[in-house]
Image (cartoon, grey):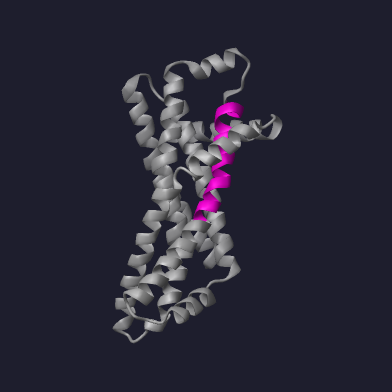
């Protein structure tokens, strides 16, 4: 365990050094941002729509027993913006983009393509890792903001069309409960989660063992580690920002 932590720390240090001292391949950065963001958008927004609907249903029946249906908008907005949207985007990104990063780099490692880059005096950290980290930093905050709007919008539609409650009152309490700080913290979480997912996934791919099993193990380690680390870091950020 301690060996992996030290290895990961060295990997992060090398990546940060290359990003600071070497020219950044901006074309590959935008390519990664497009790959991570646009391709993940349809399934992510679909999931967000159903999660927003479910939040509205669960919140309505919980508050109805207390006569607090008017608080439904506040519940959906605070739960969605502060916790659900950033975590859901992180989970989907780890499951899709993170596994693809790990598997692509693992295949390159076992085929000795990463070694070939070094032989050609092309730094693999600058060419392979830095664009993925910067691309995900662009994509995840944007995806999180779209998920927030989708989540609140679908909850609003369910409140009006299915539950028969006042739509304007829902929006008034939803946006009245939110502050600029809530949005900035959600975007900050998204950026932190994205950086962690990309670094962990790339690290697992770089350290892949030979053979198909090595690729599978690297991919599995990337998604599991990313999910656990993001959950822990989410708690720490929430404790720090909202305590």
Q: In this view, does 139 lie above or below 6?
A: below
Q: Quadrant of the N terminus?
A: top left
Question: Total of numbered circles in the picture?
Answer: 0
* Residue 160 on image: x %, y %: 38, 76
Left or right: 158 in relation to 188: left
Left or right: 216 in relation to 185: left
* Residue 43 on image: x %, y %: 39, 49
Q: Is residue 14 above or below residue 93?
A: above
Question: What is the magenta segment's predominant secondary structure?
Answer: helix
Q: Is residue 72 visible?
A: yes
In this view, the residue in front, 93 or 9, is 93
- Any magenta on residue 97? no
| Residue found at the far top of this picture | 119
* Residue 213 on image: x %, y %: 31, 24
* Residue 121 on image: x %, y %: 63, 16
| Residue found at the far front of this picture | 161
Q: Which residue is drawn at 37% across and 55% down?
A: 47
In this view, the residue in front, 182 or 162, is 162
In this view, the residue in front, 193 or 150, is 150
- Any magenta on residue 141? yes
Q: Which residue is drawn at 40% across and 58% down?
A: 48
Q: In this view, does 174 lie above or below 19?
A: below
Q: Give the range drawn in magenta.
A: 125-144
Q: Is residue 207 visible?
A: no
Q: Which residue is drawn at 62% across and 33% down?
A: 27
């Amino acid at each position: 365990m301690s060996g992996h932590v030290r290895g990961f720390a060295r990997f992060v240090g090398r990546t940060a050094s290359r990003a600071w001292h070497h020219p950044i391949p901006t074309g590959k950065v935008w390519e990664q941002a497009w790959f991570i963001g646009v391709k993940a958008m349809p399934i992510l927004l679909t999931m967000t729509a159903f999660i927003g609907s479910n939040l509205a249903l669960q919140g309505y029946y919980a508050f109805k027993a207390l006569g607090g249906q008017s608080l439904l908008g506040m519940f959906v907005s605070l739960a969605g913006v502060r916790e659900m949207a950033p975590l859901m985007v992180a989970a989907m990104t780890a499951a899709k983009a993170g596994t693809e990063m790990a598997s692509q780099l693992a295949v390159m490692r076992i085929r000795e393509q990463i070694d070939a880059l070094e032989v050609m005096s092309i730094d693999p950290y600058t060419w392979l890792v830095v664009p993925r980290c910067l691309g995900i930093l662009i994509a995840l905050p944007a995806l999180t903001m779209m998920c927030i709007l989708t989540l609140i919008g679908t909850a609003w539609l369910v409140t009006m069309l299915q539950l028969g409650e006042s739509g304007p009152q829902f929006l008034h309490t939803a946006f009245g409960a939110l502050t600029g700080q809530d949005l900035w913290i959600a975007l900050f979480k998204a950026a932190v989660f994205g950086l962690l997912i990309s670094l962990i996934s790339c690290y697992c791919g770089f350290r892949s063992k030979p053979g198909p099993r090595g690729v599978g193990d690297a991919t599995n380690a990337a998604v599991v580690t990313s999910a656990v680390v993001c959950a822990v870091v989410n708690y720490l950020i929430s404790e720090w920002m909202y305590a």
